[in-house]
Image (cartoon, coloured by chain):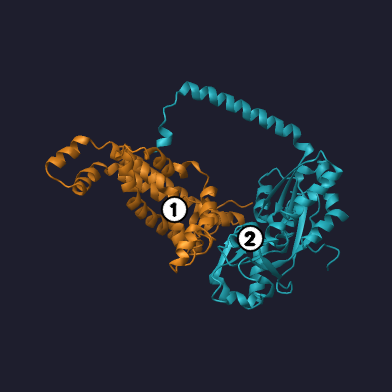
Chain colours: A orange, B cyan
Amino acid sequence: MDFSFSAAGLSAADISAIWLTVKLATLATFILLLVGVPVAWWLARTRSRWKGPVGAVVALPIVLPPTVIGFYLLVAMGPDGPLGRITQSLGLGLLSFTFAGLVIASVFYSLPFVVQPLQNAFENVPERALETAATLRASALDRFFSVVLPLSKPGLITASVLGFAHTVGEFGVVLMIGGNIPGQTRVASVQIYDHVEAMEYVQAHWLSGAMLLFAFAVLVVLYTFNPNGKR
Amino acid sequence: MNRLLEAPIKIGAVKGVAAKLLALVFLLAAGQTARAEEKLTIAAAADLQFALEEIIVSFRHIDPAARIETIYGSSGKFSTQIRQGAPYDLYFSADIAYPRELESEGYAASKAQPYAVGRIVLWSQSRDARAMTLADLADPAIHKIAIANPRHAPYGKRAEEALRSAGVWEKVEPKLVYGEDIAQTAQYVQSGNAQVGILALSLARSPQLAKQGSYVLISDRLHQPLLQGYIITRRAADNPLAQAFSRFMSGKEARTIMARYGFALPGEVE
């Protein structure tokens, strides 16, 4: 078998898959921050007895196999599933096999990787800083944006990088609900799987090598410039 | 970074547990090798997942003690895995080309034997497929059509050929979603996420799918024949169970079951 890098580089289909992956991860990270910041803030500050259950729900994707998430999403997004009924009544059709469906799946799948670093950061914001800001008559929203967020910058960076990287690394869920459509749901990880299945090892090598470099670069950046991600 | 990974764990305790786990792994591994010869592991194309199970049940009437494990998936993947030393004794492919390649490369202990000719069907849960034609797939009310991935799944290749021969490929292609093997393709349609699928007749005839939807045969003049073949792999050269099962496959009982699932049998076609 030929495992060498003989043929030239990445094909147009590979580049389209990479571009799609970047688009998916960027959009998912953006939505994850919008959703994750309030959830993490609530988890960091609340004394509610719901803190445990909510935290557990957020952490589920760390523990669950992607197949469980993929299976439930496929059923939920189908014509008789709860999500499918909503999207159909809104005239949007079904979410399965669409880019929008992948974005929603990615938000679920990567949620803990965004919420947990944010929660750690928010928990470490000193109460005194907030009280001082309050005595200066800063509103709650003002305090959040001018005190909490700047103090939590390392946490925000860690959350964004992990959310993005984890979405890039997604495979099982996409395979189950994506339907492998070029330019829509055929992301880089699925494209690699198909190369291997079709015994196109040279192409699998190129794309895998590109992913490996990307993952390494992301982690180097994360560990070099943000050594105390927890703060 | 990750709260689950932050739990304080004593290193000493980890070492103790690790040592025990390692011992357990070795113990299990030893058990595996000692029994390898009395056991049969079959890797089979996903279109066989109901027919083969029935055949194994009737094989057990002859040999009740036989330990048989089956793994279903895409033919292309199994072929790659066998080259990489996967522990399969028999390999049933949906396309005889794969076992023939393995045979010519020296990975087989038998000739590549044809065992069936597969057929493709249009299957649907939400519509009455019995009166459908390939041309109907252009209907704008059909949003998604599932086929197996033509790049590596034999049923997907034949589906693409049929759509092209019927002259509807250009209209249908934007609606296609691709399953990794024919079983995943079936699951896309069964769950209602795709309205129609091109599936294996053997799956459409399975009890699971038969009660949920309807199908129509696609003419086999529209595509290359789906000649399916199997081999005994090199590692099973001395496995008597592999030989026995291989003989059983060409016997009357197995052929009756295969015919019931809609497979044409080699020797009866051609």
Tell me which amino acid carries mark 1. Answer: Ser
Mark 1 to mark 2: distance in Å? 24 Å
Residues behind callouts 1 and 2 on a single chain: no
Give coordinates of residue B111: x percent, y percent.
81, 53
Residue B144: x percent and y percent? 55, 68
In screen coordinates, is A31 left or right of A172? left
Q: In the shown orientation, is residue B239 left or right of residue A163? A: right
Number of disc labels = 2
Closer-to-camera residue (A95/B150): A95
Chain bearing tag 1 is A
Q: Secondary structure at mark 1?
A: helix
Task: Tell me what residue is drawn at x 51 percent, y 50 percent.
Answer: A69
| Quadrant in the picture for the C terminus of chain A | top left
**Residue A190 visible (yes or no):** no
Work out whether residue B125 or residue B57 is closer to the camera in this orientation and state it: B125
Tell me which chain the residue with mark 2 is part of: B
Residue B74 location in percent, x, y? 66, 55
Tell me the residue that label 2 is attached to: B186
Q: Secondary structure at mark 2?
A: helix
Percent across and percent down for residue B222 are 70, 74
Image: B2 above or below A79: above
Mark 2: amino acid:
Ala
Q: Quadrant of residue A200?
A: bottom right
Give the residue at x 44% y 53%. A106
Task: Name the residue located 32 percent from the left edge and 52 percent from the top edge.
Answer: A34
As drawn, which residue projects farthest toward the left? A136
Residue under pointer 1: A106
